[in-house]
Image (tube, rainbow, N blue to C red):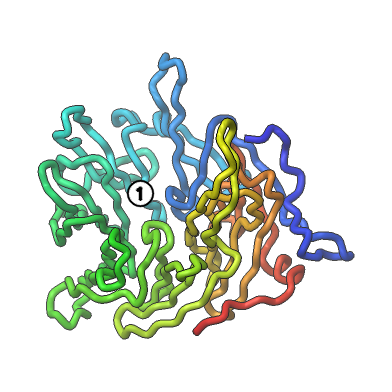
Amino acid sequence: MTDNPVTSIVDERAIGPGGAPFDWLIDSHRFPGWTFLHQSSYFDGIATVVDEDDDGVRPPELYIIDCNVWPPTEQCMSEICSDGAMHDRRLVAAQGEYRYWIRTLERSDSGGGERTQFERSVGGRFEALGPVLTLRSGCDAVVAAGVIYAVYWRPGADGKSLLRVDAHGATEIFEWPGRLDLLPLGPGRILIAAHNESRSVEQACYWLWDENGNNSSGTPLSGPHAFPAIAIDPDCALAWLGGDEILFCSASEEDTLQLHRFDVVSGTHRVAPLEGLGGGRSQRAKVKGMPEHLVWFWPRIDIGKGAGSWWIFNDVATYPGKRTICWFWNQDSNEVIELAWDPVRMPDVLGVLYSPGIDGYLLSMVNEVHRLAGLDSAMAAQAGRQLRWK
């Protein structure tokens, strides 16, 4: 983390009013303690952070960070809730006034699993959803219209199971021998993507779970269906565009990222190269005490929702000299806006987030967050650019 305060976020290639380089920075806020706001744990402007005492004198405290106001606010959950150790809860979604959690009731050091409870909260009032379950660690979950869908690994099982959890109970709806990634497609509907560890297009598949009676199979589950390409990083680079359309990424033979716009029902498919964003590359690097050698940097982006038809493609690949923080892409107009910055600052950059409460974009860095200029101003400062779909 750099101790130098951020006073500007200037892109020399974008020209602002009066011919000066465009400055993205509107305002800054520094958190009092260690704070990391990542796309993966940020839900509609809400995130959590656990404050731990390095000396172990006091118990860990869970704080809710609300980025829907400016500057962001922090609230210690133990001040409004006396229901057990708050740091044993993990936020998995925020929808309207509700927060959804996975709570660890009892940990096991013998590999026998952890006693786990799914919960929903409003303010400091928590409500249990479904029964207490014994799960192995690493449970992942998404929420669609108040229903939790959770991928978990039962102690003694060889593969993953998918649970549907609501106020009435928990039902196992799917099993798979490997890793699964989930994407909500609206109320009662999710996409279940099999993680393709073999990187074989023949094994790139997904299932659709639809409780609205739209599956031709006559049951909620249909599949497997084929992806048109090998999806990479589906845990962070998979997004729902609305209707039956999704976004996902693959890598070309040259390891340029390819963005796919894919209809999961009809199979309609288009692809656009993301040249200059998150691409894989080889660069020479020197580590102290070792000879210079070639290092491979794997391509990777996170896809997050922006305002209206805008999406955020955070470049999370790490390589020396990197300047691009993210692209903003509009799914209706196809316009692209690039946010680039000083590569010296890049190690502290965690990504760009959208806050619906202030209808604005935030640049997240280690222990601080910066409010960015609106996209209309940024668009006026940059030359027009669009994705090239094929």
Q: Where is residue 289 in the image (x, y as percent from the top left)?
A: 57, 31
Judged left or right of residue 98, residue 387 is right
Seen at 53% across and 67% down, the residue is 311
Q: Name the residue under label 1.
A: 92
Q: Where is residue 201 in the image (x, y as percent from the top left)?
A: 31, 72
Q: Position of residue 246 (x, y in %)?
A: 39, 73
Q: Quadrant of residue 355?
A: bottom right
Judged left or right of residue 189, residue 239 is right
Question: Label 1: how many residues lie within 10 Å, few (<14), some (14-19) or many (20+)?
Answer: many
Q: Which is more toward the observer, 271 or 66?
A: 271
Under tag 1, what secondary structure?
A: strand
Tell me the quadrant of the picture where the N terminus can be found. top right
Judged left or right of residue 109, residue 146 is right
Kindly tell me whether residue 68 is visible in this rendering: no
Using the image, determine if residue 93 lies above or below residue 374. above
Using the image, determine if residue 293 lies above or below residue 312. above
